[in-house]
Image (spheres, rainbow, N blue to C red):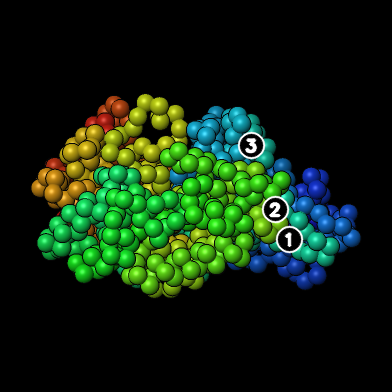
Amino acid sequence: METAVEKNGFRISGSKGETVIAQLRLSATIDGCRIDAADWHGETPQRFEAKTNGISFKTTFLSGPDSLLLTAEFRNDSDKTVKVGDIRWTREPGSDALAVPGPKLRVYREGWTMASACGSVGWGEADFSMNPDYVPFATSAPERFKPAKPNRFTSEYVTVLMPENADSVLAGFLSGANRVCRFEIELGESEPVQIDAVSCGDAIVLQPGEVFRAEPLLLLSEKDPYTLLERYAEFRGERQRIRGWDHTPSGWCSWYYYFEKVTENDVLENLAYMKEHRSEYPLEYLQVDDGYQAALGDWLTTNDKFPHGLEWLAKQIHDAGFKPGFWLAPFMVEERSGLVQEHPEFLVHTPEGEIAWTSQWRGSRVAVLDGTHPGAQDFLRQLFRTLASIGIEYVKLDFMMYACAAKNGRYHDPAATRVQALRRGLEAIREGFGEKRFILGCTTVLGPTAGIVNAERIGTDITPYWQRGEEQAFAEAPTVPNVCRNLINRVYMHRRLWVNDPDVHIARIDNNELTENEILLWTSALWMVGGLTLLCDRFQTLAPERAALSKLLLKQTDAFENVRPLDFRESTVPAVWFGRFRETGAPVYGLFNFEDVPRILSTPVEKTESTFKEHWSGDTATAKDGRLSVEVPPHSCRIYFGGAQR
């Protein structure tokens, strides 16, 4: 891409200058006022500067054939402190590649946290509907959802603009380590009314002479929109130095069968079964989830249901030949915990100096551990050092979005943003837990965790039922369709940012409302997207025919490669999934019907393929005129293999 400076902005063109991709200007919100950078001049062919109202702006452009990396910053040249609202790139209306009528433009909008909905949206639609109580934890800008407005969308971290019959354009921030980043988009009749790329300041205080830097912004353009997301994740993973893991872990998790009622005996029962049937279930970890702790914050003390304590239980798991893992919510602190009594200074406080109580947890008020406080960082460092010393090799860190969403809260460090508070706490956790132990992030803001966690949950919780009536209206609710929507739309993150965690496999008959077809659909979804493979059923009550489904997932983790949604642009909840079976290279098509009525699902197939075999039924289907078309019952799926069969 090429850049040309204009008086008040920049023109971004294709590599040969033949297509104007966008015209951009830079501005900042300081002390509540919008300041536009003007009168740009070049320090070098790639670096430019502008001075306006006591603010010095700088920006650089690093070009590639079909990519452009933009950096932006401003310095407080006044003699007073200022509060930073944001720094943003804004598309100027005009005759560029994005001057597309709203009905002919679709937008991929990414979510803020793992539970936040993601998917393509278009003309006449509004941002995803969310439970009003959950909005502060599902978006970085709750005010933009009150109320939702047709044709106006908020996308966190990255967006893809997908015109009809033209190349798509991706804009994505290459890090979320220091700033909350989002895109504010509004479609119009003749062209977009707004496309803004925003690095938030969270009202931090900037001293005279100090500099505020936006997260670097990447622009990419090519025909296939999903390929753009894959390329973006590769760029970002390299920038944030992802950790990943040298294999895809597997294990058993206590939560989705026992939930918070789990006992020590429940864990020991399943541990004994795992040991006796190791050849059938080649599992690596046993993860004890929520329900063992005395209180949120007092993580080394167990409750009465776990009379022998953490160290003893970790040793039992080790001695059985498995690696112990435990659940923690490290930034949540219950009022009844010893931590509140002993170190209230470690918590986020209100401007008046009171503890900022942010939610309720089983009858107790909950505060937030302040990741910017040195004492809180030491607490986390020592806590996870102790967990490592007693043999725990895996932790699932849950509800970390609280670190970024303390109600009416002020951090110990007034210059820290929300995501810096989270990341500093996470860095202390990683330092204490060590480099060689596994960290899974869960219910967290997705931007700050890359480079620290090994794996990340990418969807809301799976449930042992399809959906409940009251949940259908909310896009972040824990329902099977919502989970599957996020899994396939976010498969681009897998092994580019972290190991994806799609959530656990549910196969049982007892304690389960899912039908046979729904179980096969969920198994198929996990099989195709790959990632962390965790079981959750009670082994002693698991019927053999259902156990076979879990064993299929364990036979080869990440069984498919090049997985993607083929109807990504057209469908918010993609129904046509594609991949290649890793062992043979055979093309595989997953046809998923999340609706309550039968659907005919159709997809173009490779020219060399005409006959396909369905995995679950063994039936064959023939492509006609290069398309495979199949009627799929409600809440069901079909998995068709072409070429060399399994």
Q: Is residue 125 visible?
A: yes
Q: CA distance from mark 1 to mark 3?
A: 24 Å
Please provide percent x and percent y for residue 5: 77, 59
Going by the numbered disc 3, the residue's amino acid type is Glu
Please provide percent x and percent y for residue 438: 38, 66
Nearer-N-terminus badge (1/2)? 2
Residue 43 position by quadrant: bottom right
Q: Quadrant of the N terminus?
A: bottom right
Q: Residue at x 11, y 61 (%)?
A: 276
Viewer-closest of 566 and 628:
566
Please provide percent x and percent y for residue 176: 58, 58
Viewer-closest of 157 and 314:
314
Nearer-N-terminus badge (1/3)? 3
Q: Secondary structure at mark 3?
A: helix
The residue at which mark 2 appears reads as 201
Viewer-closest of 82 and 190:
82
Please provide percent x and percent y for residue 534: 28, 55
Q: In screen coordinates, is 437 left or right of 37?
A: left
Q: Residue at x 79, y 50 (%)?
A: 30
The residue at which mark 1 appears reads as 212
Circle 2 residues within 10 Å: few <14, some 14–19, many ≥20: many
Q: CA distance from mark 2 to mark 3?
A: 16 Å
Going by the numbered disc 1, the residue's amino acid type is Phe
Q: Residue at x 58, y 31 (%)?
A: 148
Q: Is residue 639 above or below residue 59?
A: above
Circle 1 residues within 10 Å: few <14, some 14–19, many ≥20: some
Nearer-N-terminus badge (2/3)? 3
Confirm or deny contact between disc 1 and disc 2 (CB under 8 A).
yes
Q: Is residue 370 visible?
A: no
The residue at which mark 3 appears reads as 143
Confirm or deny contact between disc 2 and disc 3 (CB under 8 A).
no
